[in-house]
Amino acid sequence: MSRLLRPSRIVPAALVLLVAVAVAVWALRSPGTTTHWVQPAVRPSAPASSAPPRQLVVRKAPRDLPVISYTKVPGGFPADQASASTTPLTEGVQPNDRVVVYDAPGGQPRAYLPAEISGVDVTVPVVGRDQGWTAVLLPSVDRTIGWLAPGHDFSTAQLHDQLILKRGDHELTWLRDGVRKGSWTVATGASQTPTPLGRTFVLGRTVTDGDEYAGLDALVLGAVPEQKEALAPGLQDGHTAIHSWYHASVFGHDISNGCIRVPKTGQKALLDEIPSGTSVSIVA
C-alpha cells in the first residue's frame, strides 16, 4: 500500500509494513489492439429489427466534476462484471489531458480521469467497447469500471504482459503475450487484511525504504484495501503493491496487510520487465 502525501509524487505509507519514501513512476506507450466487452451471462436476444442503432448522446460534463485521485474515486460507477476473468487485457488508454468518465455508454458524467495521478502517467486497461464507447478499469478503487466517450482526447497503448495471482495457492504468474515467463510462491494478505480479489493493474513503480524490502522497488497497483478499518490509520489511504521481502519464511502464507510479497529474484524480473498499465488478475 502507498499513500499520496504531496503533488507530483506517490509516497507509500505502507507496502505491507510499509514505506514512506518518494515515488518514481513511469508509463510505457505503444500502438494498441482491440479488446471486447464480455457479459458475465448470455441474455436472450431481442427480436431482429431493421431500425438503425440508437444514437447515444454524449452529455457535457459540469466544470466542477470531481477528478479521480490517488486516494478517492467518486461514486456512481458500475461494477466490473467480469472481475474474476483472467482473459488478457491487451490494450490500454492513456489520457492526453483529463477525460470525462461516464457511468455507462450515453450515461451520466461522474468524474475526470487525469493524464497523471501524483506524477504517474496514467495507463488504464481497456475491458470493453460499445457503440464507440470504451470501458476501462479505474484506479484507486476495486472492481469498478468507467466509460469514455468516442472522440475524447486519449491515446492507446498495446499491453503485452499479464500478472495472475492465485490467492489460495499463493502463486503469482507472469505471462507475456500468453506465454508463461515466470511463477513464484508469494505471501498474500492476512484474513483481516486480504489481498483484494478481481482485475486491477500496475499503476506505477515506487522506491522503498527499509531492509525488509530487500533493497528493491515496489510495483503499486490500482487496487486499494478491502477493510480499511482493520489497518492502522496511516495505512488506510494506501494501495496494494507487489514487493520483495527479506525473509523466505513468509512465502506461501497469508500474512501481509494486503500486499503481495515476492521472492527477490522474482521482484527483480518484474521490475525489469513490467510497465505501467499491465493488468493484474487476482483470483481466489
Image (tube, rainbow, N blue to C red):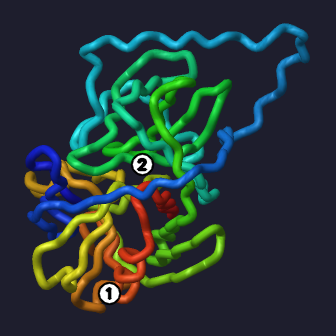
Specify the label residue 264 is tagged with.
Answer: 1
Q: Residue at 59% across / 50% down in the picture? A: 32
Q: Amino acid at mark 2?
A: Thr
Residue 160: percent from left, percent from top: 57, 63
Rendered position, 97 above or below 102: below
Q: Amino acid at mark 1?
A: Lys
Residue annotated with mark 2: 123
Q: Residue at 20% across / 80% down in the picture? A: 213
Specify the label residue 187 is tagged with.
Answer: none
Comparing 201 with 120, the one in front is 120
Comparing 276 with 111, the one in front is 276
Comparing 63 with 170, the one in front is 63
Residue 134 visible to an observer of this rendering: yes
Q: Quadrant of residue 52?
A: top right
Identify the secondary structure beneath mark 2: loop
Q: Horizontal placement of 109 versus 173: left or right?
A: left
Q: Quadrant of residue 218?
A: bottom left
Residue 172: percent from left, percent from top: 47, 75
**Residue at the bottom extreme, as displayed:** 248
First reached walking from the N terminus: tag 1 or tag 2:
2
Identify the secondary structure beneath mark 1: helix
Q: Horizontal placement of 152 versus 234: left or right?
A: right
